[in-house]
Amino acid sequence: MRNSITESGLGQIRITRGNLGYPLEAMKCPACQSSDVRASRYRPEDGLWRSIFYSAYRCRDCGRRFEQLTRAPLFGTVVVLSLTLTFSLGFLVGGALNGAPPRNEVAAPASLPPREILERHPDDSPVPSSPDLTLVASAEQGDPRAQLRLGMAYLKGDGVERNPATAIKWIERAAAQGYAEAQYALGAMHHSGRGALQSFPVAFRWFELAAQQNHADAQFSLGLMYRSGQGVPVDKAKAYTWFNLAAAQGHERAREARDSLLPALTPEQVLAAQRAAQDWRPAAAKK
Protein backbone atom coordinates (compact mmCIF):
# COMPACT_ATOMS: atom_id res chain seq x y z
CA MET A 1 0.00 0.00 0.00
CA ARG A 2 1.46 3.37 -1.02
CA ASN A 3 1.62 6.35 1.26
CA SER A 4 -1.13 8.82 0.43
CA ILE A 5 -1.27 12.59 0.76
CA THR A 6 -4.58 14.35 1.22
CA GLU A 7 -5.16 18.09 0.94
CA SER A 8 -7.09 19.66 3.81
CA GLY A 9 -9.07 22.84 3.92
CA LEU A 10 -6.46 24.41 6.21
CA GLY A 11 -3.71 24.25 3.66
CA GLN A 12 -2.04 21.31 5.40
CA ILE A 13 -1.23 17.86 4.18
CA ARG A 14 -1.35 14.65 6.20
CA ILE A 15 0.93 11.76 5.42
CA THR A 16 -1.02 8.76 6.66
CA ARG A 17 2.07 6.52 6.73
CA GLY A 18 5.70 7.36 7.24
CA ASN A 19 5.13 10.12 9.81
CA LEU A 20 2.64 8.11 11.95
CA GLY A 21 -0.22 10.47 11.10
CA TYR A 22 1.34 13.66 12.56
CA PRO A 23 -0.10 16.77 10.76
CA LEU A 24 2.64 18.76 8.98
CA GLU A 25 2.75 22.19 7.40
CA ALA A 26 2.33 22.03 3.60
CA MET A 27 5.72 21.06 2.29
CA LYS A 28 7.18 21.33 -1.18
CA CYS A 29 10.10 19.68 -2.90
CA PRO A 30 13.14 21.98 -2.48
CA ALA A 31 14.17 21.15 -6.09
CA CYS A 32 11.00 21.49 -8.19
CA GLN A 33 8.57 23.00 -5.65
CA SER A 34 6.13 20.16 -6.22
CA SER A 35 3.70 19.30 -3.44
CA ASP A 36 3.51 15.67 -4.52
CA VAL A 37 5.82 14.19 -1.88
CA ARG A 38 5.77 10.94 0.03
CA ALA A 39 7.51 9.51 3.09
CA SER A 40 10.79 7.77 2.37
CA ARG A 41 12.72 5.10 4.20
CA TYR A 42 16.15 5.77 5.73
CA ARG A 43 19.21 4.18 4.25
CA PRO A 44 21.93 2.58 6.46
CA GLU A 45 24.43 5.27 5.48
CA ASP A 46 22.21 7.96 6.97
CA GLY A 47 23.23 6.90 10.47
CA LEU A 48 21.28 6.38 13.68
CA TRP A 49 21.46 10.00 14.81
CA ARG A 50 19.68 11.39 11.72
CA SER A 51 17.12 8.59 11.73
CA ILE A 52 16.10 9.64 15.26
CA PHE A 53 15.87 13.40 14.77
CA TYR A 54 14.83 13.71 11.10
CA SER A 55 12.06 12.38 8.82
CA ALA A 56 12.85 11.55 5.19
CA TYR A 57 10.67 12.38 2.18
CA ARG A 58 10.90 11.92 -1.63
CA CYS A 59 9.36 14.01 -4.43
CA ARG A 60 7.25 11.91 -6.82
CA ASP A 61 7.76 14.32 -9.68
CA CYS A 62 11.53 14.78 -9.77
CA GLY A 63 12.61 12.02 -7.39
CA ARG A 64 14.46 14.45 -5.08
CA ARG A 65 15.01 13.04 -1.56
CA PHE A 66 14.98 15.53 1.35
CA GLU A 67 14.61 15.56 5.18
CA GLN A 68 12.83 17.57 7.84
CA LEU A 69 13.50 17.88 11.57
CA THR A 70 10.92 16.08 13.72
CA ARG A 71 9.71 16.60 17.27
CA ALA A 72 12.40 14.31 18.70
CA PRO A 73 14.66 17.17 19.91
CA LEU A 74 11.78 18.60 21.92
CA PHE A 75 10.99 15.21 23.45
CA GLY A 76 14.67 14.60 24.19
CA THR A 77 15.04 17.97 25.88
CA VAL A 78 12.00 17.30 28.08
CA VAL A 79 13.37 13.87 29.08
CA VAL A 80 16.83 15.22 29.91
CA LEU A 81 15.43 18.09 31.98
CA SER A 82 13.10 15.71 33.84
CA LEU A 83 15.94 13.32 34.70
CA THR A 84 18.18 16.19 35.82
CA LEU A 85 15.45 17.63 38.04
CA THR A 86 14.71 14.18 39.52
CA PHE A 87 18.35 13.49 40.44
CA SER A 88 18.82 17.01 41.84
CA LEU A 89 15.75 16.71 44.07
CA GLY A 90 16.86 13.23 45.19
CA PHE A 91 20.29 14.56 46.15
CA LEU A 92 18.83 17.49 48.11
CA VAL A 93 16.27 15.34 49.92
CA GLY A 94 18.90 12.71 50.75
CA GLY A 95 21.20 15.35 52.18
CA ALA A 96 18.40 16.81 54.29
CA LEU A 97 17.42 13.40 55.68
CA ASN A 98 20.96 12.29 56.45
CA GLY A 99 22.10 15.62 57.82
CA ALA A 100 25.50 17.23 57.48
CA PRO A 101 28.56 15.14 58.41
CA PRO A 102 29.95 15.82 61.90
CA ARG A 103 32.76 18.31 62.04
CA ASN A 104 35.74 17.91 64.33
CA GLU A 105 37.90 20.72 65.49
CA VAL A 106 40.66 19.57 63.15
CA ALA A 107 41.23 16.52 61.02
CA ALA A 108 42.48 13.40 62.77
CA PRO A 109 46.28 13.05 62.48
CA ALA A 110 47.98 10.34 60.49
CA SER A 111 50.08 9.23 63.46
CA LEU A 112 48.51 8.72 66.88
CA PRO A 113 50.26 8.27 70.22
CA PRO A 114 52.22 5.00 70.17
CA ARG A 115 50.74 3.17 73.14
CA GLU A 116 46.99 3.36 72.83
CA ILE A 117 45.74 3.97 76.36
CA LEU A 118 42.18 3.35 75.21
CA GLU A 119 42.99 -0.31 74.54
CA ARG A 120 44.69 -1.14 77.83
CA HIS A 121 44.50 -0.50 81.57
CA PRO A 122 47.05 0.84 84.04
CA ASP A 123 49.89 -1.62 84.49
CA ASP A 124 47.93 -3.92 82.15
CA SER A 125 45.66 -4.90 85.05
CA PRO A 126 42.47 -6.46 83.67
CA VAL A 127 39.10 -5.13 84.66
CA PRO A 128 36.95 -7.87 86.24
CA SER A 129 34.34 -9.46 83.96
CA SER A 130 31.69 -8.64 86.56
CA PRO A 131 31.14 -5.47 88.64
CA ASP A 132 33.84 -5.21 91.32
CA LEU A 133 32.42 -3.54 94.39
CA THR A 134 35.89 -3.26 95.88
CA LEU A 135 37.09 -1.31 92.81
CA VAL A 136 34.08 0.99 93.02
CA ALA A 137 34.62 1.54 96.73
CA SER A 138 38.30 2.37 96.20
CA ALA A 139 37.43 4.81 93.44
CA GLU A 140 34.84 6.53 95.60
CA GLN A 141 37.42 6.82 98.40
CA GLY A 142 39.72 8.75 96.05
CA ASP A 143 42.21 6.11 94.85
CA PRO A 144 43.36 7.51 91.42
CA ARG A 145 44.42 4.09 90.14
CA ALA A 146 40.99 2.67 90.95
CA GLN A 147 39.32 5.71 89.43
CA LEU A 148 41.24 5.27 86.17
CA ARG A 149 40.50 1.54 86.01
CA LEU A 150 36.81 2.15 86.69
CA GLY A 151 36.71 4.90 84.05
CA MET A 152 38.32 2.61 81.46
CA ALA A 153 35.80 -0.10 82.33
CA TYR A 154 32.91 2.28 81.62
CA LEU A 155 34.61 3.51 78.45
CA LYS A 156 35.00 0.01 77.00
CA GLY A 157 31.99 -1.66 78.64
CA ASP A 158 34.12 -4.21 80.51
CA GLY A 159 32.03 -5.70 83.32
CA VAL A 160 29.69 -2.70 83.32
CA GLU A 161 27.36 -1.09 80.83
CA ARG A 162 29.31 1.19 78.51
CA ASN A 163 28.89 4.83 79.53
CA PRO A 164 31.40 7.37 78.10
CA ALA A 165 30.04 10.20 80.28
CA THR A 166 30.66 8.21 83.47
CA ALA A 167 34.01 7.05 82.11
CA ILE A 168 35.40 10.52 81.55
CA LYS A 169 34.10 11.62 84.97
CA TRP A 170 36.19 8.98 86.77
CA ILE A 171 39.26 9.49 84.58
CA GLU A 172 39.14 13.25 85.11
CA ARG A 173 39.00 12.69 88.89
CA ALA A 174 42.14 10.61 88.69
CA ALA A 175 43.88 13.12 86.41
CA ALA A 176 42.98 16.02 88.71
CA GLN A 177 44.91 14.27 91.48
CA GLY A 178 48.04 14.39 89.34
CA TYR A 179 48.04 10.74 88.29
CA ALA A 180 50.18 10.76 85.13
CA GLU A 181 48.62 7.65 83.61
CA ALA A 182 45.14 9.22 83.86
CA GLN A 183 46.42 12.50 82.42
CA TYR A 184 47.88 10.62 79.49
CA ALA A 185 44.58 8.73 79.07
CA LEU A 186 42.63 11.99 78.91
CA GLY A 187 45.12 13.37 76.39
CA ALA A 188 44.66 10.29 74.21
CA MET A 189 40.87 10.55 74.43
CA HIS A 190 40.81 14.21 73.37
CA HIS A 191 43.45 13.54 70.72
CA SER A 192 41.48 10.75 69.03
CA GLY A 193 37.97 11.99 69.83
CA ARG A 194 37.03 8.68 71.42
CA GLY A 195 35.04 9.09 74.61
CA ALA A 196 35.64 12.86 74.61
CA LEU A 197 35.33 15.81 72.26
CA GLN A 198 38.31 15.87 69.91
CA SER A 199 40.49 18.88 70.72
CA PHE A 200 44.22 19.02 70.10
CA PRO A 201 44.81 21.99 72.47
CA VAL A 202 43.09 20.10 75.32
CA ALA A 203 44.98 16.92 74.44
CA PHE A 204 48.24 18.86 74.47
CA ARG A 205 47.61 20.20 77.97
CA TRP A 206 46.94 16.73 79.41
CA PHE A 207 49.93 15.22 77.58
CA GLU A 208 52.12 18.01 78.93
CA LEU A 209 51.04 17.39 82.54
CA ALA A 210 51.86 13.70 82.19
CA ALA A 211 55.12 14.42 80.32
CA GLN A 212 56.30 16.69 83.13
CA GLN A 213 56.14 13.60 85.36
CA ASN A 214 58.46 11.74 82.97
CA HIS A 215 55.72 9.72 81.29
CA ALA A 216 57.50 8.43 78.16
CA ASP A 217 54.41 8.00 75.99
CA ALA A 218 53.20 11.50 76.88
CA GLN A 219 56.64 12.91 76.05
CA PHE A 220 56.59 11.17 72.69
CA SER A 221 53.05 12.49 72.05
CA LEU A 222 54.17 16.04 72.84
CA GLY A 223 57.02 15.63 70.37
CA LEU A 224 54.55 14.53 67.68
CA MET A 225 52.31 17.53 68.31
CA TYR A 226 55.21 20.00 68.25
CA ARG A 227 56.54 18.42 65.05
CA SER A 228 53.25 18.66 63.14
CA GLY A 229 51.71 21.73 64.84
CA GLN A 230 48.72 20.01 66.45
CA GLY A 231 47.31 22.31 69.10
CA VAL A 232 50.54 24.34 69.21
CA PRO A 233 52.72 26.14 66.65
CA VAL A 234 55.26 23.95 64.87
CA ASP A 235 58.53 23.86 66.85
CA LYS A 236 60.85 21.08 65.71
CA ALA A 237 63.51 22.01 68.27
CA LYS A 238 61.05 21.39 71.13
CA ALA A 239 59.87 18.23 69.37
CA TYR A 240 63.50 17.04 69.36
CA THR A 241 63.79 17.75 73.09
CA TRP A 242 60.68 15.73 73.99
CA PHE A 243 61.66 12.88 71.65
CA ASN A 244 65.07 12.85 73.30
CA LEU A 245 63.60 12.63 76.78
CA ALA A 246 61.33 9.72 75.81
CA ALA A 247 64.18 7.98 73.98
CA ALA A 248 66.31 8.19 77.14
CA GLN A 249 63.72 5.91 78.78
CA GLY A 250 64.03 3.33 76.01
CA HIS A 251 61.17 4.54 73.83
CA GLU A 252 62.16 3.19 70.41
CA ARG A 253 59.71 5.19 68.31
CA ALA A 254 60.79 8.37 70.06
CA ARG A 255 64.41 7.59 69.20
CA GLU A 256 63.51 7.09 65.53
CA ALA A 257 61.46 10.29 65.47
CA ARG A 258 64.29 12.24 67.13
CA ASP A 259 66.86 11.06 64.59
CA SER A 260 64.54 11.82 61.67
CA LEU A 261 64.45 15.50 62.75
CA LEU A 262 68.21 16.02 62.42
CA PRO A 263 68.10 17.15 58.75
CA ALA A 264 65.48 19.78 59.65
CA LEU A 265 67.57 21.39 62.43
CA THR A 266 70.77 23.36 62.44
CA PRO A 267 73.71 22.11 64.55
CA GLU A 268 73.07 24.97 66.96
CA GLN A 269 69.41 23.96 67.38
CA VAL A 270 70.38 20.35 68.01
CA LEU A 271 72.91 21.34 70.68
CA ALA A 272 70.37 23.64 72.36
CA ALA A 273 67.72 20.89 72.32
CA GLN A 274 70.12 18.35 73.78
CA ARG A 275 71.13 20.81 76.50
CA ALA A 276 67.45 21.46 77.31
CA ALA A 277 66.88 17.72 77.68
CA GLN A 278 69.90 17.37 79.97
CA ASP A 279 68.76 20.25 82.17
CA TRP A 280 65.15 19.08 82.32
CA ARG A 281 63.91 17.70 85.66
CA PRO A 282 60.57 15.88 86.13
CA ALA A 283 57.88 17.14 88.41
CA ALA A 284 57.12 15.08 91.50
CA ALA A 285 55.07 12.12 90.37
CA LYS A 286 51.99 11.14 92.35
CA LYS A 287 51.49 7.38 92.44
Image (tube, grey):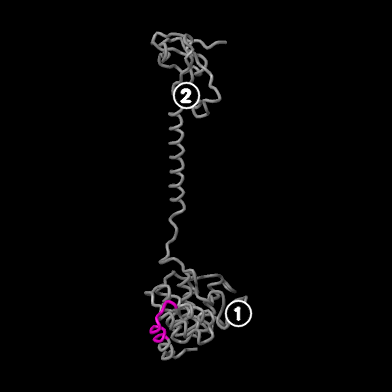
Q: How busy is the neighbourhood of tag 2: few (under 14 within 10 Å), some, or many (20 plus)? A: some
Amino acid at the residue labelled 1:
Pro
Amino acid at the residue labelled 2:
Tyr
In space, the residues marked 2 and 1 are separated at their CA atoms by 80 Å
Residue 232: quadrant of the picture: bottom left
Residue 270 located within the stretch drawn in magenta = yes
Residue 140 visible in the snapshot: no
- Depicted 258 relative to depicted 32: above or below: below
Please report whichever mark, 2 or 1, sits nearer to the chain's N-terminal start.
Answer: 2
The residue closer to the viewer here, 235 or 198, is: 235
Which range of residues does the magenta coloring cover? 263-273
Residue at the spot of label 1: 126
Residue 31 visible in the snapshot: yes
Mark 1 lies on a secondary structure that is: loop
| Image spot of residue 202 (x, y percent) | 41, 75
The residue closer to the viewer here, 20 or 56, is: 56
- Depicted 144 relative to depicted 20: above or below: below
Residue at the spot of label 2: 54
